[in-house]
Image: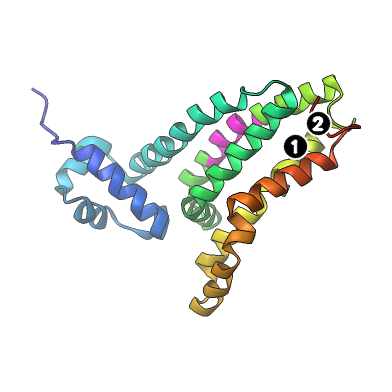
Amino acid sequence: MSRPSNKADLKLLKAGESLVREKGFLGFSIRELCQKANVNLGMFHYHFKSKNEFGRRVFEKIYEEFFVDFEHKALTGETEFEQLENALRELTFFMRDNGSIIASMLGDALCGSRLTADIIKNIAPRHLGIIFELIKKCLKKGYIKKMPAEKILVFVVSSVISSCILFYVSKKICSKQEALFIDSLRESMVGDKAILERISISLNALNAETGGKK
């Protein structure tokens, strides 16, 4: 007979997402997680067995919700150039909206967390693969300048998401006074208008002749 959970697993996942955003995966204990979720410690082990398995479920939940929407929107648009623009926009907004958790994941990976390093290694090729295929299609159609697709991928992705990563990583490592200064740059670094401008500038730099949009 199955043990009733009273949605304990969902409560733990919700609390876990909050703690990962705040402290990173390495920054909280299972006991602290259960207290935040108001769930018995035994229910954690019943549903997830280990903290690593729990962390995997938390990260996968966040990413899968994004990827379904990303994949759909990346395929909308009359031309491959417009689809590329849409894909870059959705990826950058995801990085911005989940900046604190991404900064925590990067920090955990650099501190030796095999779990977060493996998750980053496994999920990055999925969305980058879609963008890469769109770049190759744009090259084939003549929408962007002829150069190696790999170089274009590195250029456009780093151009549009670097400010998002820098903003949230800086907030985590800076002093309170320095963080206030970083906050004053929020609109310039991660505001909607700033993100769209960076995407436009990056794609215009790759323009074959007339702006790419044909």
| Label 2 CA crowd tier, 10 Å (few <14, some 14–19, many 20+) | some
Q: Is residue 35 visible?
A: yes
Residue interval drawn in magenta: 120-129
With respect to residue 75, does 194 lie above or below? below
Q: Position of residue 111 (x, y in %)?
A: 52, 58
Q: Which numbered dot is residue 149? A: 2
Q: Amino acid at mark 1?
A: Leu
| Label 1 CA crowd tier, 10 Å (few <14, some 14–19, many 20+) | some
Q: Nearer the viewer, residue 44 or 148?
A: 148
Q: Position of residue 176 (x, y in %)?
A: 49, 77
With respect to residue 11, does 188 lie above or below? below
At 38% from the left and 60% from the top, the residue drawn is 27
- In the displayed structure image, the side of residue 134 where residue 71 appears, left or right: left
Q: Nearer the viewer, residue 29 or 96?
A: 96
Picture quadrant where residue 54 is located: top left
Labels 2 and 1 touching (C-beta < 8 A): yes
- In the displayed structure image, the side of residue 43 where residue 76 appears, left or right: right
Q: Position of residue 49 (x, y in %)?
A: 26, 39
State yes or no: residue 212 in magenta. Answer: no
At 60% from the left and 32% from the top, the residue drawn is 127
Q: In this figure, which residue is indicated by the disc labeled 1?
A: 153
- Outermost residue toward the bottom in this view: 177
